[in-house]
Image (spheres, rainbow, N blue to C red):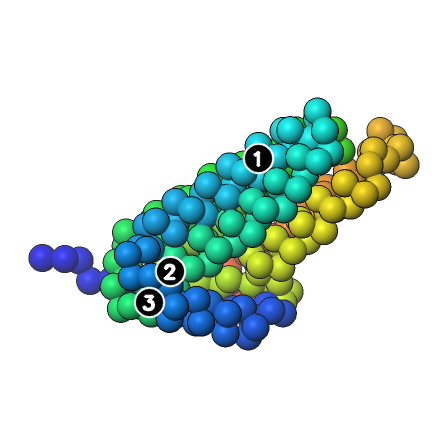
């Protein structure tokens, strides 16, 4: 017997949600049937590898950053469509899909952010702060699924797609601006931006954790 899987309430209020949803619905309807959700997941991971390779290559030539932009587009296509196609075709595998999708998300995010830290534009230590912030928010999202049955896909009107757009803009800034001189200690503007995003995510994690804890405490008062 298969275990009972409770439905997950997906909460998404990011800025481009409506436009993206229309695009994904059109793609789901026109995608060849032989392209499966698993193939799309693999395609998204391939995009993350392209991003990582492009960032590494930027140490030799900034033109490698164009590979990064292409990789972000490939990653969006695969990562956004795998679950959408499964739901559109009504072939969802809730436990398998949830496990595989979020496992790949964690690995892909590590490739993207560590890749930024291995460029000549951003210090690795700064990039790791951003990675820690993102992973903390991911942990919060996964815990919320368990304790509240909610999967929040956006915070402060921003979700994965907005984050990719920000990272593409950051990458293009690296290409056109080039190496920046330090402005605070040994940190240049790119360091300050990436580190600032990381710190914002860490603060957001603390705030969201406190809010959810208060909500759960009210729903489950002490027995004595």
The Cα–Cα distance between marks 3 and 1, rounded to whole angstroms, is: 30 Å
Residue at x 57% of width, y 73% of height = 19
Give the secondary structure at mark 2: helix
| In the image, residue 115 above or below residue 34 | above
Q: Which mark is residue 34?
A: none
Quarter containing the C terminus: bottom left
Residue under label 2: 83
Residue 63: x %, y % from top left: 71, 36
- Residue 134 shows in this picture: no
Residue placed at 51% from the left, 49% from the top? Answer: 75
Seen in the image, is 125 located left or right of residue 131?
right
For image coordinates 44% across by 53% down, the residue present is: 78
Mark 1 or 2, nearer chain start: 1
Q: Residue 196: horizontal and vertical position, in percent?
A: 74, 46
Judging by the rendered image, the residue that carries numbered circle 1 is: 52
Q: Which of the 4 image quarters holds residue 192?
A: top right
Q: Secondary structure at mark 1?
A: helix
Q: What residue is shown with label 3?
A: 87
| Mark 2 closeness class: few <14, some 14–19, many ≥20 residues within 10 Å | many
Residue 47 seen: yes
Q: Disc 3 vs disc 2: Cβ atoms closer than 8 Å?
A: yes
Q: Residues within 10 Å of mark 3 (few under 14, many from 20)?
A: some
**Quick one: 222 or 28, which is closer to the camera?**
28
Residue 109 or 132: which is nearer the viewer?
109
Q: Are marks 3 and 1 in contact (CB under 8 Å)?
A: no
| Residue 202 x, y percent position in the rendering | 63, 48
136 w.r.t. 216: above or below? above
């Amino acid at each position: 017997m298969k275990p009972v899987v409770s439905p997950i309430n997906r909460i998404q209020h990011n800025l481009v949600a409506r436009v993206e949803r229309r695009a994904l619905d059109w793609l789901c309807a026109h995608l060849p049937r032989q392209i499966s959700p698993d193939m799309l997941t693999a395609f998204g991971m391939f995009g993350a590898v392209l991003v990582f390779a492009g960032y590494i290559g930027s140490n030799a030539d900034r033109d490698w950053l164009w590979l990064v932009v292409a990789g972000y587009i490939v990653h969006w296509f695969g990562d956004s469509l795998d679950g959408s196609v499964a739901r559109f075709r009504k072939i969802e595998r809730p436990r398998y899909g949830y496990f595989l999708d979020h496992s790949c998300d964690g690995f892909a995010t590590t490739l993207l952010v560590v890749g930024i830290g291995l460029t000549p534009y951003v210090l690795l230590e700064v990039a790791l702060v951003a990675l820690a912030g993102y992973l903390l928010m991911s942990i919060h999202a996964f815990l919320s699924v368990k304790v509240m049955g909610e999967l929040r896909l956006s915070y402060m009107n921003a979700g994965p797609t907005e984050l990719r757009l920000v990272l593409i803009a950051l990458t293009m800034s690296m290409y056109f601006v080039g190496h920046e001189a330090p402005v605070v200690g040994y940190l240049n503007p790119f360091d300050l931006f990436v580190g600032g995003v990381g710190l914002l995510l860490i603060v957001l994690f603390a705030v969201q954790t406190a809010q959810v804890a208060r909500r759960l405490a009210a729903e489950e008062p002490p027995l004595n």
